[in-house]
Image (tube, helix red, strand yellow):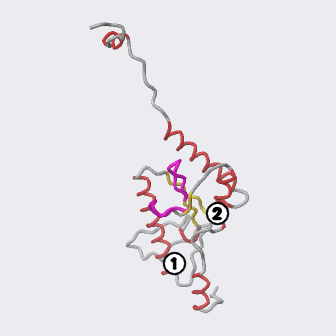
Amino acid sequence: MTDTMTPEQRHRCMSHIKGSGTKPELKVRRWLWSHGYRYRLNVKSVPGKPDIVLRTYRTAIFVNGCFWHGHGVAEPPIQDSGFKVQSSKCCKIPTTNREFWVNKIRRNQERDRENYRVLQENGWQVIVVWECQLTPKRLEHTMREVELLLNEKMLSLYRHKPIPYATEEEACQLPMAAEGR
């Protein structure tokens, strides 16, 4: 199917697509807020500038659009021409100017992987929520999974290691408070 817009119209249309405050992001934010989770948005001091940051949980949530981040699109090897990339169920790569789009999606995926790696090395939990997981049928299930991950992270942060009692041999070696020396 050919493009019905002129290149100038298409450019203007694509340049007005927002990067934050998108509908999928708002769904996640509303759900988290209504369930008592407090967060910050697009924190610049956190690597990768995640969409949602829960500092208490040391968790960064990225709400990714399936098209822009290539959800389900397998990356061919670098030495391959890259234009044989197959579209996935929720990410259809345009046939017009395919080389540009494949390279753009590949760069986005590489940048995402690098951001996730840096965050994980710094002790952050990374949660990626895909746009296709936020359909009305799947929203509750997806957000319950996010909640489970947050609760597991909270438990791991505040889990105390039990202190074992001293054995009889160790107790005999310790001085008693009432003993005089």
Question: Measuring 45% from the left and 72% from the top, which residue is drawn there?
Answer: 107
Percent position (x, y) of residue 30? 68, 58
* Residue at which label 1 appears: 101
The crowding category of the residue bearing disc 2, from other C-alpha atoms within 10 Å (few below 14, some 14 to 19, many at least 20), is: some
Mark 2 residue element:
helix
Q: Position of residue 106 (x, y in %)?
A: 47, 71
Range shown magenta = 43-61
User: Which disc, if any, is residue 117?
Assistant: none
Q: Quadrant of the C terminus?
A: top left
The amino acid type, in three-letter code, at marker 2 is: Cys
Question: Which of the 4 quarters of the picture holds residue 130?
Answer: bottom right
Tell me if residue 56 is in the magenta stretch.
Answer: yes
Residue 18 position, x and y percent, is 59, 74
Position above or below: 90 against 58: below
Residue at point 66%, 89% (across, down): 4
Whether residue 123 is in magenta: the answer is no
For marks 1 and 2 on the same chain, the one whose residue lies earlier in the sequence: 1
| Location of residue 15 by image quarter | bottom right
In the foreground, 138 or 1 = 138
Q: Is residue 64 above or below residue 181?
A: below
Q: Which residue is mark 2?
A: 132
